[in-house]
Amino acid sequence: MEDMNYLDFDIHITRAQEGYRVRVTNSPAGQADASFSLPFSELEVENLILRVGRTRRGVRRLESSEMEAARSFGNGLFSAVFSNELRGRLRSSLNIARQNGAGLRFRLHLTDVPELADLPWEYLYDATLDEFLVLSTQTPLVRYLDLPLETETLTTALPVRILVMISSPSDYPELDVEKEFENLVNGLQDLIQSGLVKLERLPRATLTNLQRQLRKEDYHIFHFIGHGGFDSQAEDGVLLLVDEAGRGRPVSGRFLGTMLHDQKSMRLAVLNACEGARASRTDPFSGVAHSLVQKGIPAVIAMQFEITDEAAITLAHEFYGAIADGYPVDASLAEARKAVFAHNNDIEWGTPVLYMRSRDGRIFNLERQISQQSGFDPAAIPVLSSVSDAVSRQVPPAARIDPENVRIDQSQSQGGISSAHAHHSGSLPHPANHRHSPFPWVIGVGGLAAIIIATLIVLNIIDLSSLLDSGRRTTDASATEMAAAQAGLPATDTETPTETVAPSPTSTPDPLLQSSLTPGDLLVVVPPLNSTDTYTPEPTATEQPIFTPAIAQTPIGGGLGQIAFASERSGIPQIWLVDIDGANLTQVTNRQDGACQPAWSPDGSQLVFVSPCSKNQDRYENAALYLINADGSAERQLTEGIGGDYDPS
């Protein structure tokens, strides 16, 4: 699997006296800013949303009128935002990323302009490259929420555990709950039976059931299917759950986030509901997705339009498959978008919106234990009895699903869902029935013995030549005794020498090998078999020659013996480099808001510094830490600078 690594391209948009101000605050090619105005009116935006977001009754043909509308909108938005200097920074950043074998992640910061959050930014289109940005794993786009707390990658073993909640209140248009779950199970069938994904469904979509289930089990992903909406009076997004009587209960993102945020293993929420991505035009954290991220969920995927069943199934299969393969969440969604597009669906790939607060998109560090298990045939695993008969009939006998990986929790049901008792057609083989080969143990023990013997030889506890001579004498003696026995002669004892000698090399060790060693390295010299080198036997009492490896010179400063410092010689503090002899004065940074307090990375290849700073001072309010290569490339922000970060070391 290709390891997905990204450089960040951070886009901050704020209001200006006329229109908006866009700033590239962090990119491989540096910073830039410009003013822009939206190239279309609110009415044109509403017409576009109605056109591409209306309910679909089937997949689209390629190059549909909706596709043309999305391309035209995306090109206009791209041209307005990436004008002049910003476009140059973008092109340079793409080149730098490719040269480093990385992708370029677009992180869109809209916290200061919530009225722009309703725009379908996922259709950004670069006409020069003839590409929608989000249709490539090399250029994913995420809506990044600036929050003070960092998220950590969760290390966990497969399978990825998904808690599914399907809500269909009795007083709202009815959803076919069983069909919805059947679609999800069938869509993830191969991932389930291979042990990569495990589904578990709540019996009823109530907050009480959710709370109890989260208390009993740990889950990685919350997957909601149901109705959603936006309460214009409360200016907040809601999901429709059910109350104890089965009627609809609107639940805000803040409320749901309160229930989920104590689940430390929960890394992702997927909301398959209408308007799950919508938020207030005045409050950036009013939507369901925004609130869940604010409450501590590292990533949330929500739908900005309705989505067809076929597109939802394809999206879930490819997305969860890529997550199980170890892809970052934004790269996984890009894979899912491409899969929707490949199914002759030219517009719905833009429906999902990814909100993220994970800096690198890696919400999981999956320990791949499934692939190391002894081989078993997933086709022989029965369907769990608690899955409905309809689901059981849809799964062919040759592709039965692991009962441990699909489960409907009946412990909390109040009679709303009955359990179907199907007969198991087979069972997993018992581990005791598998015979394990003894050869790996033999090889392991033999290897350990070899290491111990080699160590004893180096420490002069065992003499190598004596050991070899002893073996040779034993062999010769055995051969003599055998020959004597065949000739009818008595065997004779062979006198053993009392003096033990050790080989001493007469040649000098390779200077290149010596210079590559560091203090503490153990140098073992073993005479090659059939070598032309000669070895002079010496008594063991004689001290063995000791080769002292040369100690490599430690560079002074960073790079090739350079000193980093801040200087106002260009008018505002910037980071400069100079050789220790005063030669090769080089400016590293060129930030409009200044750079101070440089410090070298441990390997001397990068610099960390503080910005903004307009003059030398002890404390820099609202400053953040930045990292940059010693050659001035790949600058990126390390901290958010809440309250001011300074004095790196």
Image (cartoon, grey):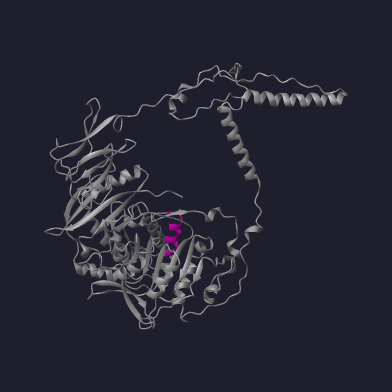
Q: Position of residue 565 (x, y in %)?
A: 21, 35
Res 132 seen here: no
**Residue drawn at x 55%, y 65% as measured from the top left:** 402
Q: Which residues are magenta?
A: 316-326
For the point 33% across and 67% down, which residue is it? 257
In the figure, 437 relative to 217: above or below? above
Number of numbered markers: 0
* Residue 94 sits above or below residue 389 on the image: above
Q: Nearer the viewer, residue 219 or 87?
A: 219
Query: Where does residue 222 sit, x and y in percent of width and height?
Result: 40, 66
- Looking at the image, residue 605 sits to the left or right of residue 178; the answer is left
Q: In the depicted view, which residue is nearer to us: 330 or 445?
A: 445
Relative to 623, does residue 288 appear above or below in the rendering? Answer: below
Determine the image quadrant of residue 527: top right
Query: Within the image, what quadrant is residue 375 found in?
Result: bottom right
In the image, what residue occupies the spot 66% across and 58% down? 433
